[in-house]
Image (spheres, rainbow, N blue to C red):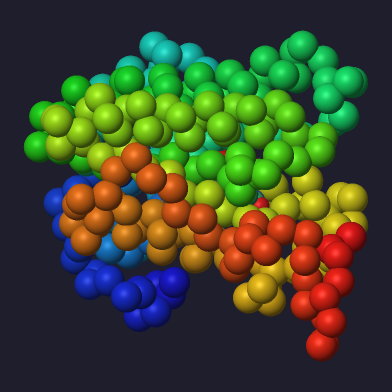
Amino acid sequence: MTDDSSSTAFRPDILAGKVAIVTGGGTGIGAGISRALAEHSAHLVLASRRRAHLEPMAEEVTRLGREALVTELDVRDSEGCEACVAAALDRFGRVDILINNAAGNFLTPADQLSERGWRAVVDIVLNGTFNMSQAVHAALRESGGGSIVNITTTYVGTGAPFMAHSGAAKAGVMNLTRSLAVEWGPEGIRVNAVAPGLVEDTEGARRLAESIGIVDDYRAAVPLGRLVRTDDVAAAVLFLCSDSASHITGHEITVDGGASIGGLFKQVGDRIDIVR
Ligand code: NAP
């Protein structure tokens, strides 16, 4: 997505007058989502633990002509989540969109995973998503219905070695997505998820895939032949937040170039190989 949103399929004003909270909105995929929402006219509340991660994106949002509020937040703290939503209401008077993007992850064999490590990831990913969703619920209802988008991952469906903590937490987020969609649908609140494959130029890709040298093999197994870009994820989020998705709730859009379909089989010239 470019600064003038010229590569988007959506009109630049589709989110005019809307206010979006993005957790982890200053880095990686969260930054791409924040940029896309601002390019399509939303005002932004950028929330994570470190102000230094958020301020450059706030400046970018302002340059795009929207307003940005920076709030220091640890999503594990439910009172902090309530304070974040209160600050958003104080500044903008409404909240229409919540993107639960904040997460933590690291590679560890399950039999060596400490209780502290397990709890930290489940606490940020699953409890943090619940805390923010619960905190924003009344504000979304009062804005006449709104949209929550949870960032999950493709290994929710497949499982993945050394990421039992993250996979289990994200699977919980996927069920939470469906449960809240059913419970809050009658109030006009839609709850969906976007599941990216491996996203280039992100902390997640550096820490989880580049560090163990699997990026080239992963890319070779993607039917569409490249890694995910943050813009690809942002476009799916934008669609789910837009009125074009007004009858879609409780579902997940996978954005992975087809990497999670096809199983173990890979076409190599005129024969079929097994993916290593
Ligand atoms: P990232 O840049 O490390 O993003 C994580 C963000 O979460 C950071 O901005 C961080 O900011 C924030 N955060 C972490 N703990 C927090 C907490 N306790 N409270 C509030 N904010 C917290 O990583 P990324 O790769 O862009 O990942 C973004 C999302 O995409 C995650 O949900 C991840 O699971 C998902 N995902 C990534 C990939 C990939 O290939 N990268 C693939 C599939 C799914 P602070 O440090 O300032 O708190």
Would residue 35 appear left or right of 157 to someone viewing this image?
A: left
Residue at position x 48%, y 14% in the image: 77
Residue at position x 21%, y 61% in the image: 244
Q: Find residue 169 and report its horizontal and vertical position in percent.
A: 60, 27
Q: Quadrant of residue 273?
A: bottom right
Q: How many marks?
A: 0
Q: In the rendered image, which quarter contains the C terminus? A: bottom right
Would residue 128 appear left or right of 119 to someone viewing this image?
A: left
Q: Find residue 143 and report its horizontal and vertical position in percent.
A: 12, 36
In the image as oriented, which residue stretches furthest toward the front? 271
Of residues 203 and 107, the one drawn nearer to the viewer in this rendering: 107
Q: Find residue 43 and report its horizontal and vertical position in percent.
A: 26, 49
Q: In the rendered image, which quarter contains the N terminus? A: bottom left
Residue at position x 32%, y 53% in the image: 240
Of residues 26 and 156, the one drawn nearer to the viewer in this rendering: 156
Q: Quadrant of residue 38?
A: bottom left
Residue at position x 82%, y 15% in the image: 114
Would residue 190 appear left or right of 260 to someone viewing this image?
A: left
Identify whether 217 is placed above or below 56: below
Q: Quadrant of residue 113?
A: top right
